[in-house]
Image: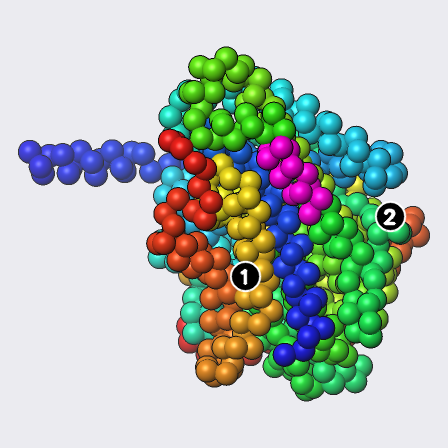
Amino acid sequence: MCRYLLVLWALISILSTPAVASETVRIGFVTTLTTGAAVIGEDMRDAVKLALDVMNGKMGPLKVEVIFENDAFNPQTGKQVTEKLIKRDEVDVVAGYIWSHVLLASAPVVLRSGKVLISVNAGPSKLAGAGCHPNFFNVSWQNDQIPMAMGEVLNRRGVKSLYVIAPNYAAGKDMVAGVERTFRGVVVGKDMTAWPDQIDWSAELTKVRATKPEAVFIFYPGKHGLSFIKQYTQAGLADIPLYSVFTIDALSLPRFQEAGMEEILGTDMTMFWAPDMGNIKNKEFVERFKSKYGRYPSFYAAQSYDAMFLIKSAVEAVEGDLDDVKAFRASLEKADFDSVRGEFKFGPNHFPIQNFYTRTVVRDSEDVWTTSLGEVVLQQHADVHASECKM
Amino acid sequence: MDIVLFIEQVLNGLQLGVLLFLLAAGLTLVFGIMNFINLAHGSIYMIGAFFAAYLTRLTESFALGILLALPAVVFFALVLERLVLRKFYERDHLDQVLATFGLILFFNEGIRLIWGSGGIAIELPTYLDGFIVLGSDLVISTYRLVIVCVGLVVAISLYGLVTYTRLGMLIRAGASNRRMVGLLGVNVDVLFAVVFSIGAMLAGLAGMLIAPIGQAQVGMGEQVLILCFVVIVIGGIGSIRGAFIAAILIGFIDTMGRAYFDVLLLKILTVNAAETAGPALSSMGVYLLMAGILVFRPRGLFPAQGVK
């Protein structure tokens, strides 16, 4: 009896294997669409939709279907929706992930299934080094790199003593490690704050004032950045220069402008991309994004846009044959697409090798606050963890 | 230990404490008197922040924004109480938790639909946006000092209201023995509505006060809700005095933990271990305090008298 059932099950599963699957490429996209961090997820979703418009909904011979899932800023939820994408929706590629801790919880699910995973934002050190995987790609940066560039900027400006404040989670620790790796002065104080619940930094700011550093370095992505900078000014610390990474972006700038926080105009951060980058692909992207959504795209949007075109390049290279994961992976490795950041190639650990620049907060010609590209800080920089990666 | 630094940290702790008190006062009254678990209390805090931020934008005056937002929050709370919550007073706690948790989701998404997920940031008026320099080194943000003062004034008035007025007497009686109050001919429906709107007003006020420091944002209520429950459990459910003392205590423990704990740990641990353990342990501080207090006073520091 058991054997008949088994045969029956085998027959049914052959029948139900969708023959049509080869005509569409299904992409699962995990991002944050609720909680206060939803602004980021919405920006990414908008960029993906724009990319689909530009591609006319096709990658090579295949139609594209993108299934958006919400991780609710929570590693457990992220893992659950990833499981759903793999098991129920049977997607070909899983992309997305803003948060390092969500990605670290979800990555094993995708990688164990043999599918390809493309991180659109999170770049935890673990997945760049010893934990790297042939099926894992990252189209943003490794978490350390942007703060490493910032450490270099601080050296160039002659800063000798630095106070560091960052949230206490995977990316926060990577950011701090990154700036400490290149900064040659002394870190005179360091606070790792509860994430994401702590929204009042009075105790930390009081310590900053008592320590009198030459500069303060922070990392507060999403909404925390505005609150932090506001409290920084309210605490009377405005005369100590504040250097930030991932804190001021196209998503928070309208809020800064609404709140009249002129003190951030002219401040610098480090980044791999800015909306005024001169290459044709980027001009096209920013123009289309602005006309469709009426605002500047953030770097999150830029990365999402790139991810879609990366996938497209690989689907075209294998002529739509996604069953051959090896060939698909090899085409992804070539990164044969025009990136909005200009030159783009993957290192041996599947993280990009790229330039990092300073980026300054400016007013554009229509009096909208945005960011503008500055000088190159790190040239064609590969992350430091790549050497630990054995694929 | 630097004394100026210490005074500043004390003020920081006090400010966190009074904000927690404003939130917890309403929660403890509603829980203590109506025996109603209102998880959506944090939503009222969020709605207070959004009302104040929106009205400040509209009127271009922070003071006017708050003056208009307060009655708006009370009105909102009364409608909520009348339409939804009243139906759950007689149900068991699980039903109440489920219903009010549903309300949290509903209000978060509702606010997102109206004001977008970006939240609203507001400017402080110039007379509040500075800092006061006392002595040589002591620098205090004016606005934070205002929060402390407002919080203390509210705490004292609430204490006066509960201790010396007829309404306060009914509130205390309600906390001790709900049924008896009803049997003595007091209109319990009205009493509950009044208590609920007082609680909502205080929570809304806390949201309004915090909005200019951070910003009005979706989901801000859940970030403080747990801490509020810790406060009312430590203070004793139904006790305003307990809520005040517990809130100040937690404000201090939390702030001092963040301010001094890593320095203390450095004395006994290596730099690396201290950096890792410091933040983890200091965020555990308030829960350790709660566990410790509950061992000796299972009903909190100042339990309401009489049968539950």
Residues shaded magenta: B152-164
Residue B242 sits above or below residue B141 on the image:
above
Where residue B5 appears, as percent x and y from the top left, is: 69, 72
Query: Is residue A38 visible in this depiction of the protein?
Result: no
Image disc number at residue A1 = none
Quadrant position of the C terminus of chain A in the picture: bottom left
Q: Residue at x 66, y 70 (%)?
A: B6
Q: Answer left or right for A17 relative to B156.
A: left
Mark carried by residue B253:
1
Where residue A61 appears, as percent x and y from the top left, is 54, 44
Say which of B161 and A319 sits in front: B161
To which residue does mark 2 refer? B125
Say whether marks 2 and 1 touch (CB < 8 Å): no
Quadrant of the image for the N terminus of chain A? top left
- Marks 2 and 1 sit apart, C-alpha to C-alpha, by 31 Å
Q: Is residue B233 above or below residue A231?
A: above
Residue occupying image coordinates x 72% and y 73%: B4
Label 2 marks which chain's residue?
B
Q: Left of B79 or right of it: where is B89?
A: left
Mark 2 secondary-structure assignment: loop
- Looking at the image, the residue that sits furthest to the left is A1
Residue at point 53%, 16% (across, down): B186
Q: Chain of mark 1?
A: B
Judged from this view, the residue extending furthest toward the front is B164
| Disc 2 residue type (three-letter) | Pro
The amino acid type of the residue labelled 1 equals Ile
Note whether residue A7 is visible: yes
